[in-house]
Amino acid sequence: MTTLPAPGSVGPPRSATVGVVTAAGAAVLWGLGNIATHVVLERGVSVAAFTLIEIGTSVLFLAVMCRILRTGWLSPREHWRIGLLGVLEPGLTYLVMNWGLAHTSVTHASLIGATEPLMIALLAWLLIRSPLPVRLFLPMGTALIGTVIVVTVNADSSGATWLGDAAVALGFVFASLYAVGSSRFVADHPPLAVTFLQQMCAYVVIGPPLLVLTAVGGVGTADGATTWLFVPIIGIATSSLTFWLYLTSLRHVSPGTTAQFLALIPVTGFLGAVFILGEETSTPAFIGAAIVLVSLVTIARMEHRAEVEAYAEAV
């Protein structure tokens, strides 16, 4: 596999293949996690208790993995900027998004979320001058169109409010700023260590209010050990592994490229709802999913070709 040194060059080699695979893996896990979260919350687990256990389990898992893989922990005092990004996401993003989702429709939230890849690419270009290659404009646009088709055909449009929409939009702005900001640190620090520090800082901020809400409102009406067992599993899969993979991707390709693979989240959710939950769908939704997949494969091939050409010029 062709690899190139990271810009500036004392860091590890860069590989477009690794960047694409890890970005896709993170998006697929996020999509499957959305389905699992929906099922668990429907069974009566309170949102506060769920989030408290989810992120708490993630922090514990990341701490253990740092020890197993002998990855040094980053000092919050020395690397406070990295930790502050964790407060942004999953901290504030999770709180704002969860509130917004409770006050708007799935259709509106999904349509707003469909703009996140483009938002990250544009913010990365504006704030840190990350390259936004013209060659990617067409597949980026078709991926956005395919995503809109999927979420429009398969979502319920009732119950939307402008305040809920605004909260969801703010959550995606936070998430986009997190992605752009984190891309500046993963070149110099191990993605695992960055993920652990960020989520630990997030938990310090949102843990106490979530604990109070759980103490006051209770843990919900869910019974049965199986339902509760899924909560920490979801925490590891959709908080630990997803952010770890996503930050690894940012180490190898630009934030704009990594962001495009977030389009796999609604596609994975759609396919999971159809084939796992048995929900009914329509032909246009499958066409939209196919458009997204073809667009992402095109982006992956373009990035790999650019990497090979750059390597040829370097040698």
Image (tube, rainbow, N blue to C red):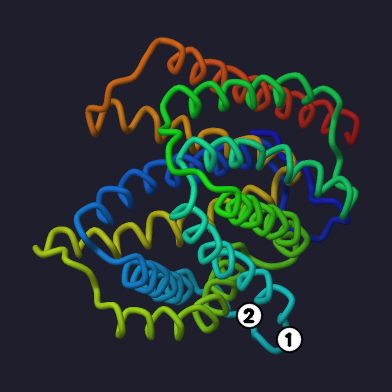
Mark 2: few/some/many CA within 10 Å (<14, 14-19, 20+): some
Q: Residues within 10 Å of mark 1 (few under 14, many from 20)?
A: few
Q: Which residue is at 38% across, 74% downward? A: 52
With 243 as the anchor, is 54 left or right in this view? left
Which residue position is annotated with label 2?
Answer: 74
Q: Are marks 2 and 1 in contact (CB under 8 Å)?
A: yes
User: Is 136 left or right of 27, judged from the image as shown?
Assistant: right
Nearer-the-camera pick, 182 or 276: 276
Q: Compared to 40, does 60 lie above or below? A: below
Q: Which mark is residue 78?
A: 1
Q: Which image quadrant is residue 92 in?
A: bottom right
Task: Please provide percent x and percent y for residue 95.
Answer: 51, 66
- Percent across and percent down for residue 82 are 69, 73
Q: Residue at x 28, y 62 (%)?
A: 231
Q: Quadrant of the N terminus?
A: top right
Q: Amino acid at mark 1?
A: Glu
